[in-house]
Image (cartoon, rainbow, N blue to C red):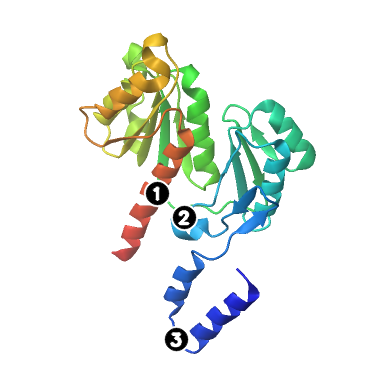
Protein backbone atom coordinates (compact mmCIF):
# COMPACT_ATOMS: atom_id res chain seq x y z
CA UNK A 1 0.00 0.00 0.00
CA UNK A 2 1.46 3.36 -1.04
CA UNK A 3 0.80 6.61 0.86
CA UNK A 4 -0.93 8.10 -2.20
CA UNK A 5 -3.35 5.19 -2.60
CA UNK A 6 -4.15 5.20 1.10
CA UNK A 7 -4.76 8.96 1.05
CA UNK A 8 -7.13 8.61 -1.90
CA UNK A 9 -9.04 5.89 -0.10
CA UNK A 10 -9.33 7.96 3.08
CA UNK A 11 -10.50 11.00 1.08
CA UNK A 12 -13.18 8.87 -0.59
CA UNK A 13 -14.44 7.78 2.82
CA UNK A 14 -14.42 11.33 4.16
CA UNK A 15 -16.34 12.61 1.13
CA UNK A 16 -18.92 9.86 1.44
CA UNK A 17 -18.08 8.32 -1.93
CA UNK A 18 -17.58 4.89 -0.36
CA UNK A 19 -18.63 3.40 2.95
CA UNK A 20 -16.19 2.16 5.63
CA UNK A 21 -17.24 -1.43 4.82
CA UNK A 22 -16.44 -0.90 1.15
CA UNK A 23 -13.07 0.55 2.13
CA UNK A 24 -12.32 -2.51 4.24
CA UNK A 25 -13.02 -4.74 1.24
CA UNK A 26 -10.50 -2.71 -0.78
CA UNK A 27 -7.91 -2.96 1.98
CA UNK A 28 -8.22 -6.74 2.00
CA UNK A 29 -6.61 -6.89 -1.43
CA UNK A 30 -4.10 -4.06 -1.18
CA UNK A 31 -0.35 -4.24 -1.57
CA UNK A 32 2.02 -6.97 -0.40
CA UNK A 33 5.52 -6.34 0.96
CA UNK A 34 8.51 -7.74 -0.93
CA UNK A 35 11.47 -9.26 0.89
CA UNK A 36 14.42 -8.81 -1.48
CA UNK A 37 13.67 -10.84 -4.61
CA UNK A 38 12.52 -14.13 -3.06
CA UNK A 39 9.29 -13.42 -1.14
CA UNK A 40 6.18 -11.23 -1.16
CA UNK A 41 4.48 -11.03 2.23
CA UNK A 42 0.69 -10.85 2.22
CA UNK A 43 0.09 -8.73 5.34
CA UNK A 44 -3.65 -8.51 4.75
CA UNK A 45 -4.32 -12.22 4.51
CA UNK A 46 -5.80 -12.25 8.01
CA UNK A 47 -8.37 -9.66 6.89
CA UNK A 48 -9.53 -11.95 4.10
CA UNK A 49 -9.25 -15.36 5.76
CA UNK A 50 -9.07 -14.70 9.50
CA UNK A 51 -5.53 -16.12 9.76
CA UNK A 52 -2.16 -14.53 8.93
CA UNK A 53 0.23 -15.91 6.36
CA UNK A 54 2.37 -18.82 7.58
CA UNK A 55 5.85 -19.66 6.29
CA UNK A 56 6.43 -23.05 4.66
CA UNK A 57 9.95 -23.89 5.79
CA UNK A 58 10.95 -26.69 3.42
CA UNK A 59 12.85 -25.47 0.39
CA UNK A 60 13.81 -22.14 1.95
CA UNK A 61 17.24 -21.32 3.34
CA UNK A 62 17.59 -20.35 7.02
CA UNK A 63 18.55 -16.85 5.93
CA UNK A 64 15.38 -16.50 3.83
CA UNK A 65 13.17 -17.80 6.65
CA UNK A 66 14.80 -15.44 9.15
CA UNK A 67 14.33 -12.40 6.92
CA UNK A 68 10.69 -13.23 6.25
CA UNK A 69 9.96 -13.77 9.94
CA UNK A 70 11.60 -10.51 10.95
CA UNK A 71 9.60 -8.51 8.40
CA UNK A 72 6.33 -10.22 9.32
CA UNK A 73 7.04 -9.73 13.03
CA UNK A 74 6.76 -5.96 12.63
CA UNK A 75 3.02 -6.26 11.96
CA UNK A 76 1.84 -9.51 13.52
CA UNK A 77 1.66 -10.67 17.17
CA UNK A 78 2.87 -14.12 16.12
CA UNK A 79 4.81 -15.38 13.12
CA UNK A 80 4.92 -19.09 12.41
CA UNK A 81 7.13 -21.24 10.17
CA UNK A 82 6.29 -24.91 9.61
CA UNK A 83 8.40 -27.96 8.72
CA UNK A 84 11.55 -26.63 10.34
CA UNK A 85 14.14 -29.32 11.02
CA UNK A 86 16.30 -29.06 14.18
CA UNK A 87 19.48 -28.06 12.31
CA UNK A 88 17.61 -25.21 10.59
CA UNK A 89 16.04 -24.17 13.89
CA UNK A 90 19.49 -23.82 15.46
CA UNK A 91 20.56 -21.44 12.71
CA UNK A 92 17.34 -19.45 13.04
CA UNK A 93 17.80 -19.11 16.80
CA UNK A 94 21.18 -17.52 16.18
CA UNK A 95 19.57 -14.85 13.99
CA UNK A 96 16.32 -14.41 15.97
CA UNK A 97 17.02 -14.55 19.75
CA UNK A 98 13.34 -14.63 20.79
CA UNK A 99 12.45 -17.52 18.52
CA UNK A 100 10.55 -20.45 20.04
CA UNK A 101 11.04 -23.92 18.57
CA UNK A 102 8.56 -26.79 18.97
CA UNK A 103 10.68 -29.81 17.99
CA UNK A 104 7.95 -32.47 17.72
CA UNK A 105 5.72 -30.21 15.63
CA UNK A 106 8.74 -28.85 13.71
CA UNK A 107 7.34 -25.33 14.07
CA UNK A 108 9.22 -22.11 14.81
CA UNK A 109 7.32 -19.16 16.23
CA UNK A 110 8.17 -15.54 16.88
CA UNK A 111 5.80 -13.94 19.39
CA UNK A 112 5.98 -10.15 19.29
CA UNK A 113 2.88 -9.59 21.42
CA UNK A 114 0.20 -11.47 23.31
CA UNK A 115 -1.73 -13.83 21.04
CA UNK A 116 -5.39 -12.74 20.90
CA UNK A 117 -7.86 -15.42 21.93
CA UNK A 118 -10.25 -16.60 19.23
CA UNK A 119 -13.32 -16.83 21.45
CA UNK A 120 -15.01 -19.98 22.69
CA UNK A 121 -14.74 -23.51 21.43
CA UNK A 122 -12.36 -26.39 21.99
CA UNK A 123 -10.35 -28.25 19.35
CA UNK A 124 -9.63 -31.79 20.53
CA UNK A 125 -6.87 -33.71 18.75
CA UNK A 126 -6.55 -37.49 18.84
CA UNK A 127 -3.90 -39.82 17.47
CA UNK A 128 -4.13 -43.50 16.64
CA UNK A 129 -0.51 -44.10 17.66
CA UNK A 130 2.56 -42.44 19.11
CA UNK A 131 4.20 -42.39 15.67
CA UNK A 132 1.49 -39.97 14.53
CA UNK A 133 2.58 -37.35 17.08
CA UNK A 134 4.58 -35.07 14.73
CA UNK A 135 1.52 -34.46 12.54
CA UNK A 136 -0.79 -34.15 15.55
CA UNK A 137 1.52 -31.71 17.31
CA UNK A 138 1.74 -29.64 14.13
CA UNK A 139 -2.04 -29.33 14.34
CA UNK A 140 -2.03 -28.63 18.08
CA UNK A 141 0.68 -25.96 18.04
CA UNK A 142 -0.84 -24.31 14.97
CA UNK A 143 -4.23 -24.08 16.69
CA UNK A 144 -2.70 -22.71 19.90
CA UNK A 145 -0.66 -20.09 18.05
CA UNK A 146 -3.87 -19.04 16.30
CA UNK A 147 -5.50 -18.44 19.69
CA UNK A 148 -7.66 -21.56 20.11
CA UNK A 149 -8.05 -23.86 23.11
CA UNK A 150 -6.69 -27.36 22.47
CA UNK A 151 -7.10 -30.74 24.15
CA UNK A 152 -4.79 -33.66 23.35
CA UNK A 153 -5.44 -37.41 23.48
CA UNK A 154 -2.62 -39.59 22.15
CA UNK A 155 -2.33 -43.29 21.28
CA UNK A 156 -5.98 -44.38 21.26
CA UNK A 157 -6.08 -46.34 18.00
CA UNK A 158 -8.50 -49.10 17.07
CA UNK A 159 -5.99 -51.87 17.90
CA UNK A 160 -6.90 -51.19 21.53
CA UNK A 161 -10.33 -49.59 21.21
CA UNK A 162 -10.89 -49.64 25.00
CA UNK A 163 -8.32 -46.82 25.27
CA UNK A 164 -10.58 -44.59 23.18
CA UNK A 165 -13.80 -45.65 24.90
CA UNK A 166 -12.39 -44.72 28.30
CA UNK A 167 -12.16 -41.08 27.13
CA UNK A 168 -15.70 -40.54 25.91
CA UNK A 169 -15.99 -37.41 28.08
CA UNK A 170 -13.20 -35.67 26.16
CA UNK A 171 -14.90 -36.50 22.88
CA UNK A 172 -18.22 -35.19 24.20
CA UNK A 173 -16.58 -31.91 25.30
CA UNK A 174 -15.02 -31.18 21.90
CA UNK A 175 -16.44 -28.61 19.49
CA UNK A 176 -14.24 -29.83 16.64
CA UNK A 177 -12.24 -33.07 16.55
CA UNK A 178 -9.02 -33.61 14.61
CA UNK A 179 -8.23 -37.33 14.33
CA UNK A 180 -4.75 -38.28 13.12
CA UNK A 181 -4.08 -41.85 11.99
CA UNK A 182 -1.78 -43.86 9.78
CA UNK A 183 -1.78 -47.60 8.95
CA UNK A 184 -5.36 -48.32 7.74
CA UNK A 185 -6.72 -45.00 9.07
CA UNK A 186 -9.89 -46.33 10.73
CA UNK A 187 -9.89 -44.11 13.82
CA UNK A 188 -11.76 -41.06 12.35
CA UNK A 189 -14.71 -43.27 11.37
CA UNK A 190 -14.93 -44.73 14.87
CA UNK A 191 -14.70 -41.30 16.50
CA UNK A 192 -17.28 -39.81 14.14
CA UNK A 193 -19.69 -42.56 15.18
CA UNK A 194 -19.41 -41.30 18.77
CA UNK A 195 -19.15 -37.52 18.34
CA UNK A 196 -21.80 -34.83 17.77
CA UNK A 197 -19.35 -32.32 16.24
CA UNK A 198 -17.35 -32.08 12.99
CA UNK A 199 -14.50 -34.58 12.64
CA UNK A 200 -11.43 -33.77 10.56
CA UNK A 201 -9.43 -36.82 9.50
CA UNK A 202 -5.70 -36.48 8.95
CA UNK A 203 -4.03 -39.47 7.27
CA UNK A 204 -0.35 -39.90 8.03
CA UNK A 205 2.42 -41.59 6.09
CA UNK A 206 3.04 -43.98 9.00
CA UNK A 207 2.57 -47.66 8.15
CA UNK A 208 3.93 -50.72 6.40
CA UNK A 209 4.41 -50.95 2.65
CA UNK A 210 0.79 -51.54 1.73
CA UNK A 211 -0.18 -48.22 3.33
CA UNK A 212 1.58 -46.63 0.34
CA UNK A 213 2.95 -43.68 2.28
CA UNK A 214 -0.45 -42.60 3.55
CA UNK A 215 -2.61 -43.40 0.52
CA UNK A 216 -4.34 -46.30 2.29
CA UNK A 217 -5.47 -44.28 5.35
CA UNK A 218 -6.44 -41.40 3.07
CA UNK A 219 -8.75 -43.66 1.06
CA UNK A 220 -10.17 -45.21 4.24
CA UNK A 221 -11.06 -41.79 5.60
CA UNK A 222 -12.55 -40.65 2.29
CA UNK A 223 -14.67 -43.83 2.24
CA UNK A 224 -15.86 -43.43 5.83
CA UNK A 225 -19.41 -44.63 6.41
CA UNK A 226 -19.71 -42.26 9.39
CA UNK A 227 -21.33 -38.94 8.54
CA UNK A 228 -19.60 -35.64 9.27
CA UNK A 229 -16.00 -36.60 8.45
CA UNK A 230 -13.88 -34.19 6.42
CA UNK A 231 -10.39 -35.19 5.27
CA UNK A 232 -7.25 -33.16 4.61
CA UNK A 233 -4.11 -34.20 2.78
CA UNK A 234 -1.55 -36.72 4.04
CA UNK A 235 0.47 -35.41 7.03
CA UNK A 236 -1.28 -32.04 6.82
CA UNK A 237 -1.68 -31.22 10.51
CA UNK A 238 -1.41 -27.51 9.76
CA UNK A 239 -4.29 -27.59 7.29
CA UNK A 240 -6.46 -29.54 9.74
CA UNK A 241 -5.90 -26.92 12.45
CA UNK A 242 -6.81 -24.04 10.13
CA UNK A 243 -9.95 -25.85 8.98
CA UNK A 244 -10.96 -26.50 12.60
CA UNK A 245 -10.36 -22.84 13.36
CA UNK A 246 -12.51 -21.74 10.44
CA UNK A 247 -15.34 -23.96 11.68
CA UNK A 248 -15.21 -22.35 15.13
CA UNK A 249 -14.91 -18.83 13.69
CA UNK A 250 -17.94 -19.42 11.46
CA UNK A 251 -19.99 -20.67 14.42
CA UNK A 252 -19.03 -17.60 16.44
CA UNK A 253 -19.96 -15.30 13.56
CA UNK A 254 -23.37 -16.94 13.21
CA UNK A 255 -23.99 -16.55 16.94
CA UNK A 256 -23.28 -12.82 16.71
CA UNK A 257 -25.88 -12.51 13.94
CA UNK A 258 -28.62 -14.01 16.10
Q: CA distance from mark 2 to mark 3?
A: 27 Å
For the point 47% across and 70% down, the residue is 26
Q: Secondary structure at mark 2?
A: loop
* Nearer the observer, 138 or 13: 13
* Left or right: 5 in relation to 64: left
User: Can you identify the residue that label 2 sits on?
Assistant: 50
> From the viewer's perspective, is residue 254 above or below residue 197?
below
Q: Secondary structure at mark 3?
A: loop
Q: Position of residue 32 (x, y in %)?
A: 59, 60
Q: How many residues crowd mark 1 within 10 Å: few (<14), some (14–19), many (20+)? A: some
User: Is residue 253 visible in this depiction of the protein?
Assistant: yes
Query: Quadrant of the rendered structure where residue 66 is?
Result: top right
Mark 1–mark 2 CB contact (< 8 Å): yes
* Disc on the earlier residue, 2 or 3: 3
Q: CA distance from mark 3 to mark 1?
A: 33 Å
Q: Which quarter of the rendered picture does the N terminus lie within?
A: bottom right
Mark 2–mark 3 CB contact (< 8 Å): no
User: Is residue 174 visible in this depiction of the protein?
Assistant: no
> From the viewer's perspective, is residue 140 above or below residue 37?
above
User: Can you identify the residue that label 1 sits on?
Assistant: 246
* Nearer the observer, 230 or 175: 230
**How many numbered marks does the figure carry?**
3
Q: CA distance from mark 1 to mark 2?
A: 8 Å
**Residue at the extreme right:** 94
Q: Position of residue 28 (x, y in %)?
A: 49, 64
User: Can you identify the residue that label 3 sits on?
Assistant: 17
Q: Position of residue 206 (x, y in %)?
A: 45, 17
Q: Secondary structure at mark 1?
A: helix
Amino acid sequence: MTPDSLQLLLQAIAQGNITPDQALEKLKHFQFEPVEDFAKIDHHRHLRTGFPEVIWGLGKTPEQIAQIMQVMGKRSPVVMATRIEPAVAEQLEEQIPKLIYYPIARICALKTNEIPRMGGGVISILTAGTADLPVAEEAAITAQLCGFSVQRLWDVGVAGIHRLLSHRELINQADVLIVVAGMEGALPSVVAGMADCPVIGVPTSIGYGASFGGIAPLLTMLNSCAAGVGVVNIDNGFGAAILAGQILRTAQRLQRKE
